[in-house]
Image (cartoon, rainbow, N blue to C red):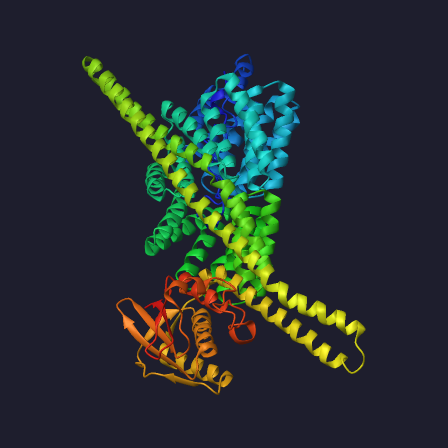
Amino acid sequence: MTQSSAVPHPEGRRSRLGGMPWLSALSSCVPAMMLAMMMALFLSGCGENQAGAAASTEISGDARVQELLTLAAASRNDDPHKTIDYSSQALTLLKEIPEPASEVMALSNLAWAKMLLGDFTEAAQYGEAALTLAENQHQPEMLVVPLNVTGLIYWRQSQLDKALTYYQRALEVAKGLNKRSFEATTYNNMGLIHSDKAEYQLALECFTRARDIHQGLGDERPLATALNNIAGIHATLGDYGEALANQQASLRIREKLDDKPGVAELHHNMGITYEQIGDLKESMLQLQQGLRGFEALGDKTGMAQALTALGMVNQKLKNDVDARISMEQALAYGEELNDGNITATALMSLGKLALAMGDAQGARRYLERGLAIADRLGLVALQAQGRLRLADYFLVTSEVDVARERALQAQQLALTSGDRSLLRDTYEILSQIYERKGDYQQALASHKEFKSINDALFNASSQDRLAWLRSSFEAEKRQRQITELESEKALQAEVIKQQRVARNLWILALIAVAAIMLLLYGRHSQARVNQALQRSIQMQRDLMQAVAHEFRAPLARVQLAFDMLMEADAKEQPQLEDRVLRGLEELDELIREIVKLIKAEGSPRRAPSESLSLAPLLQTLVARQHQLFPEKHLELAAIDEDLRLTASKKHLEWAINNLLSNALRYSREQVRVSCQRESEHLCIIVDDDGPGVPASERERIFEPFVRLDPSRTRATGGIGLGLAIARRLAENAHGHIRVGDSPLGGARFELIWPY
């Protein structure tokens, strides 16, 4: 009699949502779920290998034991209750007809069935009993099954180090027996443990060894699992092209074998990959297909994972109600299954959603519950995600120092795990935190790190690779449909062949058109970048030349005064010291104005806007300027009290002040300020009775350090940067400044600001 049929042959478990960015994209969020954490069919070769040994063993007693073990094995995945019934009957008979090998198989089947039903305590007891019995027989080949089953049970309970110990023992036994299939499946199981511990390089090494061995043996089913797991690691490390390539290879094998659980899992995992790429429409289609497959199989673990992923996609699509429903269903499944990983991931997804919906306190409750579970289970990726989301919460509630502390903790965990997507998200929020604290140097450094990692994850070659993979995947689906049609309608083979050729020509044409469009767009984008760089370089060159020119005169005066001071007598020294101080003050004013110009060139684009009432704003600014020029008559025309606009208050005041200051400097006696509405703009008008600005010079006066005639020296005409700064501020707000003739006889400056 043989006993191979009683060997547990699990289809494997998908990723336990272990805190990767994939699943709920705690999008960061779980900035990353392992896309292909399917449990290897750790004993796919075990039954065959042990069958040969058992076939030569004559089991004394009733053949009914072997029949029951065969029935238990046949139902272990589809109906675990039947497996429990058949295995229990076999154990009862084995009390009268002892046979250790059969008893080990019966206990292992019981452990497997209890695990599928979520009764992990009893499952562990049966697994340990099977392992103890196998150890007492001193037959290494009997240890493989209970070691793998027990390791899987502890893994499902997130006791990762304990599970890894069992798998390492199983690997030693497999190598000692020279059982390559056992060795490969055990490598795969160890890879899953390393993945959950965020040790991604170790996980990739294990999965790659498993793939190579299965490929050499021609074992297609476990080969598909290894490919899926390799895809999960590549996805976590941000190499989405490699992830999709391995997932497609695994899907082809699953479909060939008509492996419904595996096909459902692949659609689920590919949905998460497309979500990370940003193709939300395709992601939704793949995830829904995976969810239907899990529902047909009654797989609650798979349903929970798919629901969490769908919730995150719905959140990105602004379908918040649907997102909450999906995430709450996933949380219910996680609690029912007593799966801490699923539960923690669902809680963090709900926390991110609540924060986006404005429920800050609700978000904190979800996040702290999820983080407590992740800390207890030692799930590094989820620990980092939880702290990152709490940093979001504390930033929203203006607890900036606490937010910084949580973000730095998340950054350290992301560096430890090597998760680049998660590390990118930590730098992004750190940039926001430092900007809120006013530490712009640190904010800029964090933003540069964010941009560097983000560019590495989504560079041009990656995008081209992904576009090719998507089109290849669609072509393969159409190819399968045509193949099915050929088998059903053999008489139409020639017609179908012609259709295939035409279709391929269309695909090649579309790919060629897409490549040409991408090339043209790339050249256009590069040209725009080059133009912007040239303008920036020219502006900097002009500014440096102007700065050098403007510094020369005051520096020369200071140097001359110092030289004279060294040789002057006591009576002349006070007068010379006064000349030195005036020169230094002039240099200080020049430096301040240059700094203002540099700020106007950059940061105003990111300045926060607010709703402003124009009348009181102008009244305040006019009053301030009149204090500086009391001898001038400064008049403010009547302005509609209801006139409002949305703008950065700081930059609007800055621009108006520079125009007022310019007018007051060059006016003879009178300056008038008025305002009028022009369709989609407001026009703030400053008139003076000064010498005016010739039409030929009206553009030149906005260049830095320009004063139109020798009479307008720095003593009377300022540094020559005020109008340059005002124009930069107006242009950054999508407005501009016009110069014309004033009814008062001088110059009219019109500040055009978007209404």
Q: Residue at x 55, y 48 (%)?
A: 423
- Looking at the image, the residue that sits furthest to the front is 710
Q: Residue at x 35, y 50 (%)?
A: 314
- Quadrant of the image for the C terminus? bottom left
State the image coordinates of residue 391 (x, y, percent, origin top left).
53, 59
Q: Residue at x 72, y 77 (%)?
A: 576
- Callout count: 0
State the image coordinates of residue 331 (x, y, percent, origin top left).
43, 51
Question: Which picture quadrant has residue 567?
Answer: bottom right
Q: Is residue 283 above or below residue 205?
A: below
Q: Is residue 719 above or below residue 494?
A: below
Q: Is residue 540 left or right of residue 643?
A: right
Q: Is residue 614 left or right of residue 502?
A: right
Q: Viewer-proximal residue, 638 or 141?
A: 638
Q: Viewer-proximal residue, 17 or 28?
A: 28
State the image coordinates of residue 557 (x, y, percent, origin top left).
67, 69
Q: Viewer-proximal residue, 8 or 257?
A: 257
Residue 307 visible (yes or no): yes
State the image coordinates of residue 731 (x, y, percent, origin top left).
40, 61
Residue 99 visible (yes or no): no
Q: Is residue 29 above or below residue 649?
A: above
